[in-house]
């Protein structure tokens, strides 16, 4: 499932290429035809993300809410602007307008296509197609896709915990610390609870707990407040790094050669995630795998006592 950094990057892509433009909206698959009709031909005014939810604002206060879930993904075609000037921006390959395609979901990749027509024909089960004169985005397999009014958007936001990019102030950190302090639930479950903190998924959960040397089974209310605050600050750091790089790079404090290896190979990118049975990179104890809250948890029983 795409984690918070991916959703923020997708929102940025819409901000670069769709906001300020009239958008033709359709549902090639047909399952979202009525919703598409509500926003077809309207100008997109805003693109934002909170946690794993993305919101696209159109004229007349109509919002398109998307939650990709496990299988959802966006494909962008045509004008796909660079997100950043440096750091492996996915749109910076310089291909001609009708030959560029960028896939954005849990992972990202860029292709060059020999398109003979514009717009290209939909491929597969496209739930929603958003199209401007120069840019096109196809959505497949989302968990949620709906048009909401402002009250509907607020109802969704009210269910979500703070997100460092949409709640950048110190109040958000204090809110997170206060919520955790009341919970008997293990911290390993709280970090995945989107009503407690937004955007963290399985990868970031395992890596943040290891970076904090924190036992995932520790009840939230027994975690010292300064440790909970440090978790928030680490999420601020990792989320920013993920948005800028497009990668879940959690071994960011390794030396130059290690950093280069991490960028080149996903197996060298994480401390514990998907390393069950392998020696811990710090203490050589075998990394454990267990299921908690129906999700896989990876951790080191020595470093995270």
Image (cartoon, rainbow, N blue to C red):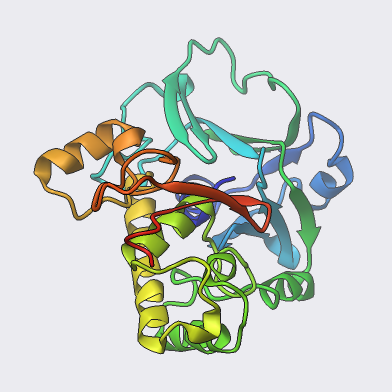
Quarter of the image where one finds residue 264: top left
Residue at the spot 51% in from the left edge and 47% down from the top edge: 289
From the top left corner, tell me how far across and down residue 176 is, in percent. 51, 82
Give the number of callouts. 0
125 on left or right of 67: right
In the current view of this chain or complex, which residue is farthest to the left? 256
Residue at the spot 23% in from the left edge and 52% down from the top edge: 282
Location of the N terminus by quadrant is top right
Quarter of the image where one finds residue 260: top left
Location of the C terminus by quadrant is bottom left
Residue at the spot 30% in from the left edge and 31% down from the top edge: 265
* Residue 222 in the image: above or below residue 36: below
From the top left corner, tell me how far across and down residue 41 is, in percent. 72, 46
From the top left corner, tell me how far across and down residue 242 is, in percent. 37, 52
Residue 131 showing in the rendered view: no
Nearest the viewer among 71 and 189 is 189
Nearest the viewer among 88 and 278 is 278
Nearest the viewer among 18 and 56 is 56
From the top left corner, tell me how far across and down residue 100 is, in percent. 44, 24
* Residue 171 in the image: above or below residue 305: below
Residue 207 showing in the rendered view: yes
* Residue 45 in the image: above or below residue 267: below
Residue at the spot 62% in from the left edge and 67% down from the top edge: 194
* Residue 124 in the image: above or below residue 163: above
207 on left or right of 182: left
């Amino acid at each position: 499932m795409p984690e918070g950094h991916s959703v923020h990057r997708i929102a940025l892509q819409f901000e670069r290429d769709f906001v300020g433009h009239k958008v033709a909206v359709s549902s090639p698959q047909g399952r979202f035809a009525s919703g598409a009709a509500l926003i077809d031909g309207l100008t997109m005014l805003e693109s934002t993300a909170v946690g794993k939810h993305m919101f696209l604002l159109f004229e007349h206060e109509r919002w398109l809410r998307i939650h990709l879930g496990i299988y959802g993904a966006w494909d962008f075609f045509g004008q796909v602007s660079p997100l950043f000037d440096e750091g492996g921006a996915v749109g910076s390959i310089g291909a001609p307008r009708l030959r560029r395609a960028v896939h954005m979901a849990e992972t990202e990749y860029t292709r060059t296509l020999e398109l003979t027509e514009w717009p290209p024909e939909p491929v597969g089960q496209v739930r929603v197609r958003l199209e401007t004169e120069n840019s096109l985005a196809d959505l497949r397999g989302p968990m949620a896709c709906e048009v909401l009014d402002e009250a509907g958007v607020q109802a969704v936001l009210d269910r979500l915990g703070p997100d460092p990019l949409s709640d950048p102030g110190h109040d958000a950190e204090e809110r997170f610390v206060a919520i955790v302090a009341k919970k008997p639930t293990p911290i390993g479950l709280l970090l995945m609870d989107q009503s407690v903190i937004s955007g963290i998924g399985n990868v970031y959960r395992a890596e943040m707990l290891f970076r904090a040397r924190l036992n995932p089974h520790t009840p939230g209310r027994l975690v010292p407040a300064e440790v909970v605050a440090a978790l928030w600050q680490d999420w601020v750091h990792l989320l920013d790094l993920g948005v800028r790089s497009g990668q879940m790079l959690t071994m960011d404090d390794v030396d130059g050669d290690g950093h280069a290896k991490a960028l080149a190979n996903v197996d060298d990118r994480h401390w514990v995630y998907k390393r069950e049975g392998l020696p811990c990179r710090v203490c050589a104890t075998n990394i454990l795998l267990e299921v908690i809250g129906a999700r896989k948890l990876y951790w080191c029983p020595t470093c995270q006592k």
